[in-house]
Amino acid sequence: MARHKVDRKDAMVIGGASVGTVFEWYDFYLYGSLATYITRHFFSGVNETTGYIFALLAFAAGFAVRPFGALIFGRLGDMWGRKNTFLVTMLLMGVSTFAVGLLPSYESVGVIAPIALVSLRLLQGLALGGEYGGAATYVAEHAPPGRRGFYTSWIQTTATLGLFLSLIVILATRTQLGAQDFSDWGWRLPFLLSGVLLGVSLWIRLRLNESPVFQKLVKEGKTSKKPLTEAFANKRNLKLVILALAGLTAGQAVVWYTGQFYALFFLEKILKVDGALTNQLVACGLAIGTPFIILFGWLSDKIGRKPIILGGCLLAALTYFPLFHALTAAANPGLAAASQRAPITVIADPNACAFQFDPVGKAAFNSSCDIAKSYLARAGLPYRNEAAPAGTLARVTVGEATTLASFDGHILDKGQLATRRAAWEAQASAVLTAAGYPAASDSATVNKPAVIAILAVLMIYVAMVYGPIAAMLVEMFPAAIRYTSMSLPYHIGNGWFGGFLPTTSFAMVAASGDIFYGLWYPVIVAGLTFVIGLFFIRETRHANIDA
C-alpha cells in the first residue's frame, strides 16, 4: 500500500484530535488536583490520614478500571473504527466529570456520597481506557514515514496539557473566589466547566475523518472479527503485550506520575507548601517541560524510541532521591534544617505499632506508639524508628536533649483519651516548634526558582519516557488488532503501576515516617523496566504499520 501523505487538512485533523484529548485529560485530572478538597467533602467520616489515602484510592479507582476500558473500547475500535469509538469515550468522560460537580457531600447524604463519587471515577476510567489507544493509533496511522514519533508526540502532550489546564482553571477560580469560598463550594466549578469543554470536544471530534489504515482494512475486508482472541490467545502477540508492559509502559508510568502527580502531592501534603503556590510552581514546571515531549518524539524518529525511553527510566531511578531531597530543602527550608539539626526518633516496641490505615473508620490507634506516629504523620514530619523493649511506652526524641513520653490510650475512656491526646499533641507541638520545626512551609522562604528547576528536571524525565511511547506501541502490533493490543499494556502500566503510585507512596510514607520512603516504589519499577527493556525490547522506528 502507498503511504498516505499528510497534507494541511490532515495536519489540522491530527491537531483537532489532540485538542479533544486535552479536554478529556483535563476532566480526568481535576480529581487529582483537588484531592485535598475531595477528602474534606466526601471522606470526612474517617480520620484525616485515612481520609486522604481514601481520596487517593478513589483517584486510583479511575486508573484501576482503565485496562477494562482498553479491552472494551479497544475491541470496538478494531471492529467499529477509531473515530466512532473515541466519540463514545469523550461523551462518557464529559458527563461523568460534570456530574462530580453536582454530587452532595458526606455531611448531606453520608456514605452515599463517596460511593457515588467512586462510581463516577470508575466510569471516567473506563472512558479513558478507550481514549488513548484510539487517539494514538489514529494519529500514527495518518503520519508519513519517519515522522510517527513527532506526530504522536503531540498526542503525548495532551495529558500534561490537560493537567496544566486543570491547574490554571483551579488557580483562576480560587483567586477569584477566595480560599474560603473555594474550599466550601468553589472547587465544584472546574468540574462543571467540563460541560462546556465536552461540547467543544464533541464538535471537534465529529469533524474528524477515519484513519486511512482502517479505511483500507475495511475496504479489503481485513478488519478483525475477534480482536480479543487474536490479540491475547495468539502466543506471539501475547508475548509482545507482556514485553510492552514490563519493558516499556510500567517504567514510563511511574516516571510520569512521579514527575507530575506525586511531586504535586509531595509539595502540598508532605512539605506543607500552600496549595495555591504549589499549583503555580507545578504549572511553571509543566510549562517548561512540556515542549520536551515534542523534542523527544522528534528525536526518536532520528535515533530510535528505545534509547530515549529507557534512558529516562534509568535517570529517574538514579536521581529521584537526591532530587526530592533538594526539593525539600528548596520548598520547606525550615523543615529541612530542623530535621538535620534536631532529628526526630520514635523509640517504641515494634509490636505495639500498627499500620495506620483504617478503611472503615472503626479502628482505634490508641497505643503509645500509634499516638506518637499518627501525630507526626499528620504533621508531615520525618522521623526514624528505634526499637524499644517489649511492653515499654513509646517516647519521641527531638535532637539529643529533648524526650517526650507518649501514653497508653487503651486504659482511658473516649472522653479522657480525647483530652489527653489534645494535651499531648499541644505539648509535642511546642517541643517541635522550639526545635525549629515549622507547622507549614513559609511561602516567603520557598526558593521558587530552585523548586521550578527541580520540577522541570522531573518533567524532562517524563518527556523522555512519554514522548516516543505512543509511536513505539503502535509500531509493535499489527493493524487489525492494534487498538486492542497496544491499549491493554499501556493502561495496565499507567492505570495500575502509575495510577496507584500516589496512593501507595503516600501510604508508605505514613507507615514508615520517612518522607522519602515512597520513592522506592518508582525507583524499583523504573529500574526493572530499564533492565527488561534493554535486553528484550526491539527498536521499532522503521516498522511498517500498514500490515
Image: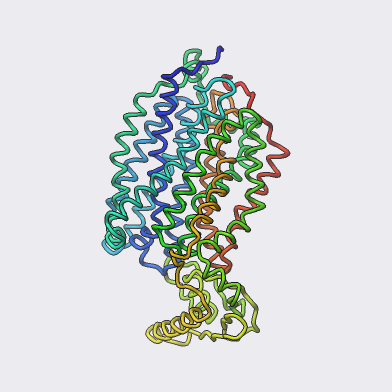
Q: Which of 361 and 306 is in front in this view?
A: 306
The figure's colour scheme reads: rainbow
Q: Which of 279 and 360 is in front in this view?
A: 279
Q: Nearer the viewer, residue 84 or 326?
A: 326
User: Would you place residue 422 above or below residue 111 in this image?
Assistant: below
Kindly identify the residue that appears in the image at 29 percent across and 46 percent down.
Answer: 192
- Residue 378 visible from this viewpoint: yes
Residue 88, position in %: x, y? 37, 33
Residue 543 occupies which quadrant of the picture? top right
**Quadrant showing the C terminus:** top right
Kindly identify the residue that appears in the image at 44 percent across and 49 percent down.
Answer: 283
Residue 50, position in %: x, y? 45, 66
**Quadrant showing the N terminus:** top right
Kindly identify the residue that appears in the image at 58 percent across and 25 percent down.
Answer: 478
Q: Residue furthest right?
A: 535
Kindly identify the residue that appears in the image at 50 percent across and 60 percent down.
Answer: 447
| Number of dots carrying numbers | 0
User: Would you place residue 203 above or below residue 223 in this image?
Assistant: below
User: Would you place residue 24 above or below residue 120 in this image?
Assistant: above
User: Would you place residue 231 above or below residue 278 in this image?
Assistant: above
- Residue 497 visible from this viewpoint: no
Residue 209 occupies which quadrant of the picture? top left
Residue 383, position in %: x, y? 58, 73
Residue 152, position in %: x, y? 52, 30
- Left or right, 179 with respect to 249, comes to left
Q: Which of 64 and 23 is in front in this view?
A: 23
